[in-house]
Each structure stands twice: as structure tokens, then as C-alpha cells.
Image (spheres, rainbow, N blue to C red):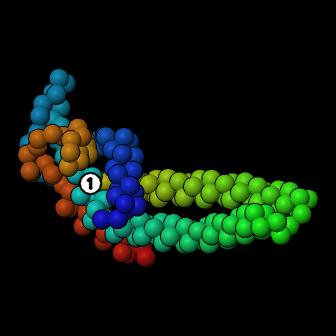
Amino acid sequence: MKKGALIFYIAISAAVLGLYILFFVSKGGEEKATTAVSAGGAKSVIAYVNIDTVLAKYDMAADLNKSLQDKTKKIENEFGSKVQNFQREAVDFQDKAQKGLITRSQAEEMQGRLQQKQQSLSQQENQYRMQLAEEQQVALRNIHSKIVDFLKEYNKTKGYSVIVSTTLYGGPVLVGNAALDITDDVIKGLNDTYKSSK
């Protein structure tokens, strides 16, 4: 997996996991798992979703990640070209200055232009970083929103009291009954919904 994709999935996992303990209360529905009696005597059913697996197999997450990678590569190529042009100008300036091919006033003028270009490149680099970070955050929020919306609909027929998320390396659920794991069901539903919306 490429570095950019790994960072994207880690960021998604962290963002979704941080927001992701979802409480769903429903009047009925089938019970896939064991029930526990609370202090008030009401039964509650808990299910969990492995968010790492969902993100790895959710087509929308893969498409958004590819789109971000393509945009990042395009920006890197465009910016890299500008940096190379700047470096050529700087080398040309140094060469002319060392060989005495320009006057002192010409050297000062050229040096001033190079400094301005360097500042401009630095500002552009910061703008690109902010733009990509913002687009990544929007992608994370879109993915989170789609997962939550799907689970709300999904839970109308399932009737779980709580759906929590877990990860491959920890999370709220460290050990769980496999019957409580609805990950595959959720992935299938998310991908079916995504395909039908395209």
C-alpha cells in the first residue's frame, strides 16, 4: 500500500473511531445476538463493526482515496515543475554573478526577484497543503456520514440498542462473539447503496 493511501486510511480510522460509538434505539426487529438485561429490566442488543475492514472494502472510501491520490500527484508534478524552474534560475544567477557577467545593480535586481519567487513558492506550497488537508477532511466526513446514515437505516430492521466500532488493533471491542460482528453485512449494504447512487 502506498504511503498516501496508508495515511488516508489511518486518518479515516482515527476520525471515524473518534466519533463512532453509535446508539440506536428501536422498538422491534430481529435479534442476531445475545441480549443483556439492564437495571431497568429492558433488554439491549449490542453489535459491532470492524471499521478498518469496512474502510478497506468500502468502494466509496477507495474511490475517494484514489481521487485524492490523483489530485496530490497532479499538484506535486505542477509544483515540482515550478521548483525546478526556480532552481535553474538560481543556478543561472549564481553562475553569472561568479563569472562577473552582470553588474552589481543587475545582481541585486535578480536576487530580489529570486527571493520573491522563493516566497511565492513557499506560499503556494502551504496553500496546496491546506487545500489537500481540507479535501481529505471533507472526504472523511462524507465517508463517516454515509456509514452512519446506512447504519441508521440498517438498524430499523435489526433493532440493536447499540452498534459500536472496533479496529484490528483495539478499540471499544477487544474480544467479541462473532455472532455480534455485523461487518460483512454492513460492507455489502454500503457498497450496494454506493453502486446504486453512482
Question: Which of these two is toward me, 125 or 171?
Answer: 125
Above or below, comparing residue 82 to residue 158 in the picture: below
Q: Residue at x 71, y 57 (%)?
A: 118
Could you tell me the amino acid type at mark 1?
A: Asp
- For residue 177, say whether it is visible: yes
At label 1, counting other C-alpha atoms closer than 10 Å, the crowd grade (few under 14, some 14-19, many 20 or more) is many
- Specify the quadrant that holds the N terminus: bottom left
Left or right, 53 with respect to 94, comes to: left
Q: Residue at x 34, y 58 (%)?
A: 6
Q: In the displayed orientation, state which residue is furthest to the front.
A: 99
Q: Residue at x 68, y 59 (%)?
A: 121
Q: Which residue is mark 1?
A: 52
Q: Secondary structure at mark 1?
A: helix
Q: Residue at x 18, y 55 (%)?
A: 182
- Residue 189 at x, y percent in the picture: 27, 65
- Residue 82 at x, y percent in the picture: 66, 69
- Residue 25 at x, y percent in the picture: 29, 41
Question: Which of these two is toward me, 93 or 39?
Answer: 93
- For residue 89, say whether it is visible: no
Left or right, 101 with respect to 45, comes to: right
- Residue 144 at x, y percent in the picture: 40, 53
- Specify the quadrant that holds the C terminus: bottom left
